[in-house]
Amino acid sequence: MAALLQHPGYEEERLQRVAEQLPCREVQAGILLSLMGQPHQYSYPSIFIYGHRASGKSHVMHVLLKELELPHATVSCVECVSVALLFEQVLLSFFGCDAASLLPRSASLSDFVRIYRQQCSQSPAKQTRYIVMEKAELLRDTDANLLPALLRLQELVEDNVTIILLSEIVWDKFRPNTGCFEPLLLHFPDYSKGELHTILSQDRHPSYSDEFYSSYINILLGVFYSVCRDLRELRHLAALNFSKFCEPLEEGKVKETDTHKLWRNIEPHLKKAMQTVYLREVSSVQWEQMQQTEEKENGALRGLSAHTHVELPYYSKFLLIAAYLASYNPARTDKRFFLKHHGKIRKTNFLKKNEKTSNHLLGPKPFPLDRLLAIFYSVVDSRVAPTASIFSQISSLVTLQLLTQVSHDDQLDAPKYKCAVSMDFICAISRTVNFEIVKYLYDFL
Amino acid sequence: NLWSLIFQGCFVFKPSAKKKKTLSLGEFLTNVFTACKVLQDELNRNILDSLLDFTRKCSSTRQHSDWASQMRASEIPTAALVLGVNVPDHDMTFQSLSDLLQQSVTPYVASVQAKECGGKGLRGSLMGTVVTVDDEEEEEAEQTSAQHHKSVHCSLSTLCDWYNTKTKKSNTGTPGKKRSSPVRDGPQQPPVVIIFKDLEAFNPRVLQDFILICSRYIERLPLMFIFGIATSPSTIQHLLPHSVSSLLCIELFQSLSCTQHLATVIDKLILTKQFPFKLNGKVMQVLISIFLYHDFSVRKFIKGIQLALLEHFHSQPLSVLCCKKKEALLNVMQLDHLDLERIRHLLSFKRYVEKQEPREQVDLLTDDTHLKEVCQKLIKDLHKYHKNYYPILRCLHTLTSSLPRYPLGKQIRELHLICLEKNVWESEDYQSAMKLLKMLAKDELIALLQRCAEILQPTLLEMNESRRAKKLSPFEVLRNEALEFIDSLVKSHLSPPESQVLNEVCYYTSSATVRRHLNATPRTSIQAALNSPFYYLQNDRLKTEDGTVSNAAPDICIVYKLHLECGRLITFTTEMLFLSLFSSARFIRAVSELEFLGFIKSTKQKTDHVARLTWGGC
């Protein structure tokens, strides 16, 4: 293991410490080390590392740069709302806050390069400087010139600097149309089941033995590995359920080595966890409380998605119903549903060739405000004055995300909307006002 | 508070001759307004308390160091606060929430609204707001951290640095010197609470990015979120993907439903003899239907009551008598001749006079001092009526609210409305309710009667005893007697207020005014203005018979009338007939004004045509 991490430029002891902190990532760390070379040597201008979530990209970079005490700046692209923020952070960590304050208010790339060169001539690099950019996929949304410039920053600023981009997306999706300097690509593969086991076993509970915790992780992976390979999630689940696993042990029913009995105890519990806490239907704190009270009342806690009931004012309900009808019925059929003497028109008369498919499969269609109001006035049973509050209810429904405005915000004349609620939701709403919505839906004729 | 401003405005314009009146009015109104405020705070008390507990608990578990809590320290504690769809009411809740948090948990509270946080992927503005809100905090406390202000951009790392210097200072410095209450008994590291007032309205991208950024700093900065949700908690899952929601530890807080809030408000403000000011049935109906049909807004309901109150005192001179019994009696003695004449013109008083002996009638109509004495008695009666009305109402409600199919309504407000309108005992529903009560099982009835007895205890103690004694005799007889007793109570005390003499003093009746103020109908007003310009302009030349237009009417009114007579498409040529009336420039201007008001619009089908946008009215 230690053999992989050998490099003439760094002390043996430090490499040893790095290796201990990077289980199952020795190969990648080794490649990176050899790419980086000795501290004073120039390194390759840009390195692109990609791999799935929680495959150790940031962790490896962090440990390497920290333990080997290399000058570096770590920037998360999510955080850098503007490029200026990015520049500021880089300058801050390389040259201190005086350099960062030299940046003008809305700094451009050339400002950055200018200040960097100026600072760098005062304090030239004795070692390679590293800029680590996490979530680099967001760089694609910024100015078109930023990414190509960063890739050859070494040339631009004439300094020993290396950019390391970390991303969940492959390089092919980054490459600009105009072409650019190609970085070195490095892939971090997903952890295998064995590797996950090794890593998870490392954060054992201090009061239990290694083997015991390791067998717990084994059981946990047996349940969850098929649905989740995210190390962070698994670690979270391991922490949440461990106390339950230990329960029979605490009560003195089982010995540490009796894995089968322990498994029988924990397995249904883990299955339940998969449906609740893993989906974040139930928060971790609530899950822990549930474990404590479970024996008494068998945890009747409802998840987040169980709360779908929404209380609405009477007319809002009808407005929503009218919106639903307008979204899912073709406008031609309004006559059939809302005129008193429509005569006998059967569904086949209305059918057009392309309308064989259900409107519910096609999703909601946009409708103009006039149509919404016309349907509203005919479904609501009493006479309603067109007051200002009817109109404001429509816009409240939009802010509540029950309706969505399709036309642009600026368009005041004849705005268009779509209904954004599900069939179940609207059925529940119509039941409360005794309106049989199914009778008015073209799809269910 | 806008209302206290308006109300101060009222003072300024009151003529000084009525100083006495304004004084008592002022005192009285302040009472009502403070009662409203207290009530609104009370409504949210429970949920706010549990939220405060939540924040305290979260900040204390952060400092725990046991294995399990360390393992999940990376989650951001989040409270999902479900408040219902009455969004205008939420502001006040959030205001008192952040006040309470600042008083007792942490000085660092920031509230953000979706509209402040840009629509188009402006992650920054959200962050900016959070940082600046905290900045203001800082400036209030003291002027420090020069290096903080130097940095051009707001970011969480600057916030983080600022927080560290802040907490270090308050920990090393003498506690209680700079910031007195929060630091003294609060935790060592007060959490930074961010309140998202309207979660649904946030751009999902902005929110996701913000949470991602925050989760990077959670180890250094004790952040905490409060999501204000108007619809249902499942919106969180619509807004946030699993990768983001897994960074949160969400706990749900559900506030009382809007209708429960309304019930409390009605219970505390309306169904009480504490405030002599009353609303009649129609006004109540208007306010309740605005609430139930339009907005669910408790705040608007209370504002409606306040509006009615001001209108009453403004328009009814006899409202001097609408105050506490003692004051009212004093005020009666100070009435001048004009006021007494007003009393003589009251409908209820006229009816009262008609029932008196002829001799007495003359006295009442001519002798001012005699009238004052009688008025004192009548005011006493009115107060007595109110004193009895509410307990009996509650009593009847307790008895009938559990009956099958709720013959007299499920909510006490429905029963109250019935009683305000007419003699409740004459209605069919009342009869059937009584029949149903006679069919109740013994233990049920006794339980109900006991609850009634509790309600009635303060007012009618002696009655209570007599009923207890009867319990020993055979059930059937007793039951009938008990119910007859209730019936007699209802008949004697639940008569509608209109039957009471001098009820005009306390009851506000103009439902149309309230409706016009609270539920505006812009379309109707515009149409009214176009149809009969006299209504707004009050110019005698505009007065016309129904359905005709005067020559003097503004051009737009004439064009409007013309367009009503046309079909969906209107050509200018037919209109040309009327050009003899006025020049074509004026005609074109009137047409474009009509278009501006949204009655017609130009159509692409034919160039010289316009399409009508309204229907009906021919």
Image (spheres, grey):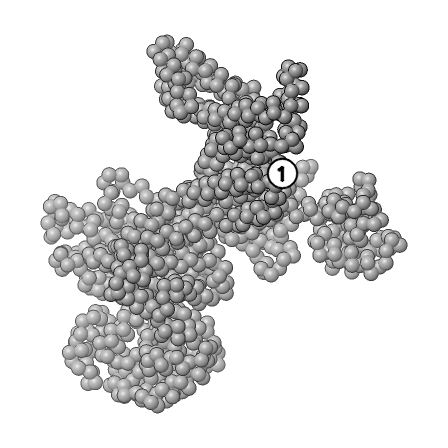
Left or right? Give the position of A123 relative to A424: left
Q: Is residue B105 visible?
A: yes
Q: Tell me how many marks there are.
A: 1
- Give the answer, above or below, for where B36 lies relative to B73: above
Quadrant placement of the N terminus of chain A = bottom left
Name of the residue lying farthest toward the right: B580
Quadrant placement of the C terminus of chain A = top right
Q: Nearer the viewer, residue B554 or B28?
A: B28
Q: Residue at x 31, y 58 (%)?
A: B180
- Give the answer, above or below, for where B155 lies relative to B617: below
Q: Residue at x 51, y 53 (%)?
A: A399
Q: Residue at x 62, y 32 (%)?
A: B336
Residue B189 point in image, percent of width and height: 28, 60
Left or right? Give the position of B570 relative to B494: right
Q: Residue at x 19, y 81 (%)?
A: A6
Q: Secondary structure at mark 1?
A: helix
Q: Is residue A420 visible?
A: no
Residue B257 point in image, percent of width and height: 44, 41
Q: Nearer the viewer, residue B51 or A150?
A: B51
- Give the answer, above or below, for where A211 lies relative to A255: below
Q: Chain of mark 1?
A: B
Residue B154 point in image, percent of width and height: 41, 70
- Graded by Cα atoms within 10 Å as few (under 14), some (14 to 19) or many (20 or more), the crowding at tag 1 reads few
Left or right? Give the position of A115 relative to A216: right
Left or right? Give the position of A312 relative to A166: right
Residue B265 point in image, percent of width and height: 47, 38
Amino acid type, callout 1: Ser
Q: Nearer the viewer, residue A46 or B297?
A: B297
**Residue bearing the label numbered 1:** B315
